[in-house]
Amino acid sequence: MQKKILSDLGLALLRIVPSVLMITHGIPKFQNLISGDIKFGDPIGIGVAPSLFLAVIGELVCPILIIIGVKTRWAALPAAITMAVAAFIAHGADPLAKKELALLYLTFFVVIMLLGPGKYSIDKK
């Protein structure tokens, strides 16, 4: 019983902490998006505005869903893809120190996809 409680608590921390930290990256992008002052790259060649919109989904909307535990595994997928693009495309030529944070977030979101949200979530799986 004790092991299950600790496991569920660990899953909650794994979900919540990286997602809260990711939101701190998503909020400035959201502010840029709604202000119309779109200053962003075009790492996958779809245009600056669509790239920024997708980054906001991956860095703000999906982490909010992950925190509360709604469609957690599905919400972790766009977040992971956003971090893969950041690490391997946007910062692909940069040294490891520059892409390290994106790789850590990518790892967190992949693990969340694999393990699910745990008991302390709306999904409760």
Image: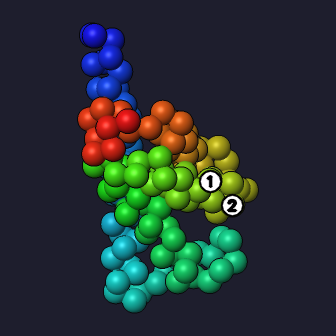
Direction right: furthest residue:
93
- Residue 71 visible here: yes
Where is residue 53 shown, x and y percent of the image?
48, 76
**Left or right, 93 with reference to 69:** right
The residue carrying mark 2 is 89
Q: Answer whether labels 2 and 1 touch (C-beta < 8 Å).
A: yes
Q: State which quadrant residue 123 falls in.
A: top left
Q: Secondary structure at mark 2?
A: helix
The x and y percentages for residue 1 are: 28, 10
Hey, which residue is sitting farthest top in the picture? Answer: 2
Q: Position of residue 91 (x, y in %)?
A: 64, 57
**x and y percent of residue 83 in the render?**
56, 54
Q: Nearer the viewer, residue 96 or 15?
A: 15
Mark whose residue sits in front, 2 or 1:
1
User: Can residue 16 be seen in the rendering of this structure?
Assistant: no
What residue is drawn where x is 51% and y is 42%?
113
Going 45% across and 54% down the picture, which residue do you hit? 75
Residue in view at x 28 percent, y 41 percent: 121
Q: Is residue 119 above or below residue 27?
A: above
Q: Which residue is mark 1?
A: 84
